[in-house]
Image (spheres, grey):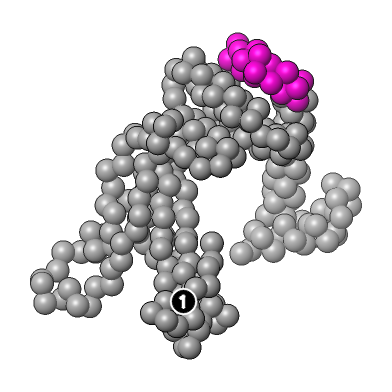
């Protein structure tokens, strides 16, 4: 998020850089620094030949407590004190969502819903997670726009299905719980489940086609022959071949 503002009575920019982590990453400080460098390379963000201030903000919600290093110098080989002036470093704001209570999670309804879902997505006890869903649906009911409810509901349910692998029993409990709070949601979740199933099948078919094309090309078959044998457009085969070479 980029804001233009007055800094020391001069025009300048402040850039809020958000990074979302669902797992522990030892090299997080290096990854975020690479993003910062890319931002600073943008000429359009420079005012009076100055680089914008970047405030990195990390949102973490992994299954275990964060124990990794939080600065760049910890990643670098140990060095004498005299070398410290040659070592770049910076700080970032770090928020572990798993340590926040419902009361502490504030903001607009849409934000609160996604934050509590993020916080609890890896909970092993499905009963606890169903309670989180109930809280989310109760919050959604407060939204005035039905269109917003529909859009956000589909988005966060897609996320849940992608991350939290529900078995048939758990899925039925989810439908039951949502239906009690949001009747329309029960119908939508069934439709969404069918859509996701179809998308999964299509992705599997596409993956299978790609593997066949790669196998034929690697065996030495010419691109035109692969197209004729598989019935797939030559243009697409050339694209896959280019990806393979890269």
Residue 179 horizontal/vertical position (percent): 68, 16
The verdict on residue 171 being magenta is: yes
Report the front residue among 183 and 173.
183
In the rendered image, the vertical position of residue 82 relative to residue 121, given as above or below? below
State the image coordinates of residue 130 (x, y, percent, origin top left).
53, 19
Where in the figure is residue 177, as x and y percent of width and height?
Answer: 62, 15
Check the picture and name the quadrant holding the N terminus: bottom right
Task: Indicate the quadrant where residue 174 lies.
Answer: top right
Report the front residue among 26 and 142.
Answer: 142
Residue 100 in the image: x percent, y percent?
38, 35
Is residue 227 rendered to the left or right of residue 136?
right
Q: How many numbered marks have been drawn onto this rendered protein structure?
A: 1
Secondary structure, mark 1, is: strand
Residue visible at 46% across and 53% down? 19
Residue 101 found in image quarter:
top left
Q: Indicate left or right for 228 with 113 as reference.
A: right
- Residue 199 appearing in the image: no
**Which span is picked out in magenta?**
168-188
Q: Disc 1 designates what residue?
A: 6
Q: Main secondary structure of the magenta part?
A: helix
> For residue 75: magenta?
no
With respect to residue 2, does 135 lie above or below?
above
In the displayed structure image, the side of residue 202 where residue 56 appears, left or right = left
The image quadrant where one finds the C terminus is: bottom right
Asked if one can make out residue 203 in the rendered structure from this viewpoint, the answer is yes
Query: Looking at this view, is 107 or 120 the one in front?
Result: 107
Q: Residue at x 42, y 77 (%)?
A: 7
User: Nearest the camera: 225 or 59?
Assistant: 59
Instruction: Tell me the crowding category of disc 1: few under 14, some 14 to 19, or many 20 or more residues within 10 angstroms, Cα based.
Output: few
84 above or below 22? below
Which residue is painted at 87% across and 55% down in the image? 233
């Amino acid at each position: 998020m980029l804001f233009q503002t007055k800094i020391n009575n001069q025009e300048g920019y402040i850039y809020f850089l958000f990074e979302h982590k669902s797992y522990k990453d030892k090299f997080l400080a290096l990854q975020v620094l690479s993003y910062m460098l890319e931002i600073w390379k943008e000429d359009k963000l420079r005012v009076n030949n100055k680089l914008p201030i970047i405030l990195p903000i990390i949102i973490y919600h992994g299954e275990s407590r964060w124990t990794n290093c939080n600065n760049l110098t910890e990643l670098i080989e140990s060095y004498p004190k005299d070398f410290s002036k040659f070592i770049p470093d910076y700080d970032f704001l770090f928020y572990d969502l798993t340590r926040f209570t419902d009361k502490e999670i504030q903001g607009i309804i849409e934000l609160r819903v996604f934050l509590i879902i993020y916080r609890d997505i890896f909970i092993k006890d499905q009963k606890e997670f169903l309670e989180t869903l109930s809280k989310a649906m109760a919050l959604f009911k407060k939204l005035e726009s039905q269109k917003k409810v529909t859009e956000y509901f589909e988005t966060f349910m897609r996320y849940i299905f992608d991350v939290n692998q529900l078995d048939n029993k758990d899925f039925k409990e989810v439908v039951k719980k949502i239906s009690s709070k949001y009747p329309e949601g029960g119908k939508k979740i069934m439709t969404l489940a069918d859509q996701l199933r179809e998308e999964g099948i299509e992705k599997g078919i596409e993956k299978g086609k790609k593997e066949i094309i790669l196998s034929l090309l690697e065996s030495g078959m010419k691109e035109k022959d692969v197209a004729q044998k598989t019935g797939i457009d030559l243009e697409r085969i050339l694209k896959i071949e280019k990806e393979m070479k890269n």
